[in-house]
Image (spheres, rainbow, N blue to C red):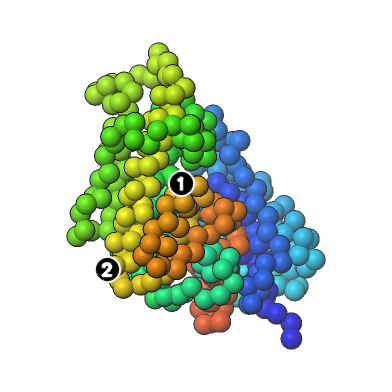
Amino acid sequence: MTPTRILALETSCDETAAAVVTDSLDVLASVVASQDELHRRFGGVVPEIASRAHVERILPVIDQTLSNAGLTLDQIDAVAVANTPGLAGSLLVGLVAAKAICAARNLPLIAIDHLQAHVYACRVASGHDVFPCVGLIASGGHTNLYDCRGPLEFELLGATIDDAAGEAFDKVAAMLGLPYPGGPAIERAAAAGDPKAYDLPRTFLRDERRLDFSFSGLKTAVRYTLVGPGKSDFSKLRLDPQRVANLAASFQEAVVDCLVDKAFLCLRKTGRRTLCVGGGVAANGRLRERLEARSRLEDVQLHIAPPRLCTDNAVMGAIAVERFKASEFESLDLDVLPGVVRRTG
């Protein structure tokens, strides 16, 4: 029998991505066009630049993906697109492209929750069912914990009340004079540093009543360590390389402590024995190392998306296969939900 083939699109932030996946979760093709070079000089994603780049790249990315898969649109059975959460302009580019294809080819349209898709990347990579599980998403825009009863049943149990982990990495990297994106830069610098050199705060770490995160205080503590309270001028700051390494290592360890401890607190509260981890920060080697060690200690089944599926991509849009099987399709008046993080569903 001919497999069901779904074209998945991802434009929630600054990566223009497309993939073709089948109902057996085979990935026939995947293309990602990065915008890192466009945003590097700004030290972060500029929404207007991101959306304009998506406009330029979305059709070539779709064409290349179909070509790599050896398919035409006539051989596609549905189109899936991330419509929440993300940058409004970026999301709209992907949604308009998906709607146009569906209207022209009379194909069903499937909506994807970008964050739930990050958890589903673990399902794709593992090759077997991972549900029910606790899902930890650590990315540039979100740091969330979910009770995932099934691939279409997510309940949000905890989230950051301010900065996301990835955002904190980017901002602290800028303070230390390290390049964008900040996550990889801090990890490289931390390799030569002492994670105990600076005693940095770990907000909510000992509060077992809540599953939330907060990284703004940690970010501020790094700033105060560098320039002192109430000051923000880094222009005359000259940092010794070892000090940069020590601060990077101490900052990284503080973030990892919070992510690991809250994830395992969530496991205890829900009674789950499987942990799935995704999002750009999940590519961090120290986080992966600590999660693996803690999982062995507590006999937890751990699934971390491979690094290529941690950063934004369309392969994780394979979660649309679950919606296709459940006949959960959208009308062409589907809209984007930029800032919405769904608590259930």
Callout 1–callout 2 Cβ contact below 8 Å: no
- Residue at figure coordinates x 52%, y 30% from the top left: 179
Name which residue type carries label 2: Lys
Judged left or right of residue 188, residue 68 is: right
Q: Nearer the viewer, residue 105 or 32?
A: 32
How far across and down, in percent of the image, does residue 319 sit?
A: 54, 70
At horizontal 54% and vertical 64% (from top left) the residue drawn is: 121
Q: Alpha carbon of mark 1 to alpha carbon of mark 2: how far?
A: 25 Å
Q: Against 51, is 27 above or below?
A: below
Residue extending furthest toward the front: 297
Location of the C terminus (image quadrant): bottom left
Q: Is residue 280 visible?
A: no
Percent position of residue 100, x then y: 64, 64
- Depth check, mark 1 against mark 2: the one in front is 1
Whether residue 39 is visible here, answered yes or no, is yes
* N-terminal-most mark, 1 or 2: 2
The residue where tag 2 is placed is 269
Q: Would you place residue 130 above or below residue 8 in this image?
A: below
Badge 2, how many Cα within 10 Å: few under 14, some, many 20+? few
**Tag on residue 286?**
1
In the image: residue 142, left or right of residue 95: left
Please state the horizontal and vertical placement of residue 114, each as a whole percent of the image: 48, 60
* Residue farthest along the top direction in this orientation: 236
Task: Say which residue appears at 62% left-offset and 55% top-offset.
Answer: 17
Category of crowding for the residue at label 1, using alpha-carbon neighbours closer than 10 angstroms: few (below 14), some (14–19), many (at least 20): some
Q: State the quadrant of the N terminus.
A: bottom right
Q: Name the mark on residue 210.
A: none
Please say if 326 is above or below 273: below
Secondary element at image label 2: helix
At a point 29% along the width and 36% down the height, the residue shown is 200
Secondary structure state at the residue bearing disc 1:
helix
Please state which amino acid type lies under the numbered disc 1.
Arg
